Amino acid sequence: MNAAAPADALLADIGGTNARFALARQDSRAPLLMDSVREFAVADFPSLAHAAQHYLDSSGTSVGTGASALTGVFAVAGRVDGDEARITNHPWVISAQRTAQALGLRSLRLVNDFAAQAMAASLFNTEDVVPIGGAVWSPDDDGDKTYAIIGAGTGLGVGGLLRRDGRYYPLQTEGGHVSFAPNTPEEIDILRHLSAEFGRVSNERLVSGMGLVNLHRALSAIAGESPGPLKPEDITARAREGDPRSLRTIDVFCAVFGAAAGDLVLTLGAWDGVFLTGGLVPKLLPTLARPGFRQRFEFKGRFAPVMACVPALAVVHPQPGLLGAAALAQQTP
């Protein structure tokens, strides 16, 4: 880390598995200080405040040194309700006020992680994304814009980004928990198996790390087999080795991901594009680039011609959550 560079803001991107921290300069065109990024396992700490303090202590730095503010923007994988946030896939309960006091911050803003993921799109360059399909996107387009954000990782995150009169507004949602809508006989069978296990089946039950496991288990059950306990990384490793069921699991995953992304575009009117983010996207990029994702993305009946013109952009920036938190820090007085 470049300890000599003063920082205005402490940033965090908290998921169900990892906590990422960094520093930002609010007055910079590139606010995220990439050499300040550190990542820790959330399971190693009893609270967010402990993890953040460990970051500051181990980095040998203090926020606000030589700077005019002492603020924080923390993006969390869960619903933010006033001062409090709960991590959907981890037992942390976070209070903005108590965490700010523990860290000596003047102010701390909690946002949903996909509000940050959405804001990252305001700072993306063309090298930060890979187009899926032929629709063209340019970060330099002027005028009002409406974007969708959907990301597969530990869970399924969903958000939006509006640009109105030159200012960006992120939309915080829990759209990953909308009900799964099957579109093929195979998916109907998958829903039947998952309904027996979970009752209600959301998109997150299929399009996430554990979604890979759920899909593999359902496809195995349909075939009258039991694969035994698996982790998401087991399925992706088996797919690389050519295992047919694991390959089919990933194909179905990408098709359902495409259908959900297309539904989100229709829901938000996000004709300017959808950004695909989350930890699984770079790992599954070769499969996403095959026709399955885009076909289901565009398979929207009378709106298929419109959907064919909507850019779908796989995010390959290494830290989109922190980048979005840095963009939000620039809006913090």
Image: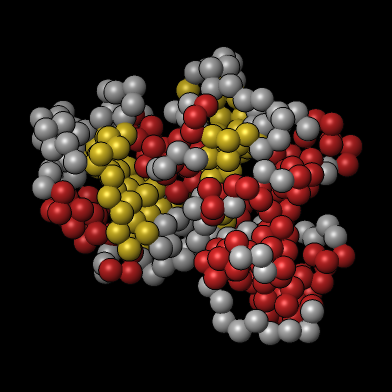
Query: Vertically, is 139 above or below 219?
Result: above
Relative to residue 42, is residue 315 drawn left or right? right
Quadrant in which the N terminus is drawn: top left
Relative to residue 215, is residue 325 drawn left or right? left
**Residue 85 visible (yes or no):** no
Quadrant in which the C terminus is drawn: top left
Relative to residue 263, is residue 45 drawn left or right? left
Q: Position of residue 127 (x, y in %)?
A: 49, 29
Query: Vertically, is 323 above or below 40?
Result: above
Query: Vertically, is 129 above or below 188?
Result: above
Relative to residue 320, is residue 302 drawn left or right? right
Quarter assignment of residue 220? bottom right
Residue at (45% x, 35% y) in the render: 120
Front position in the image: 97 or 294: 294
Q: Residue furthest top?
A: 142
Q: Position of residue 222 (x, y in %)?
A: 79, 78
Tally of numbered discs: 0
Q: Position of residue 172 (x, y in %)?
A: 52, 45
Residue at (61% x, 65% y) in the render: 241
**Residue 130 visible (yes or no):** yes
Colour option used: secondary structure
Query: Vertically, is 69 above or below 105?
Result: above
Residue at (80% x, 60% y) in the render: 182
Residue at (83% x, 57% y) in the render: 183
Q: Position of residue 215 (x, y in %)?
A: 68, 69
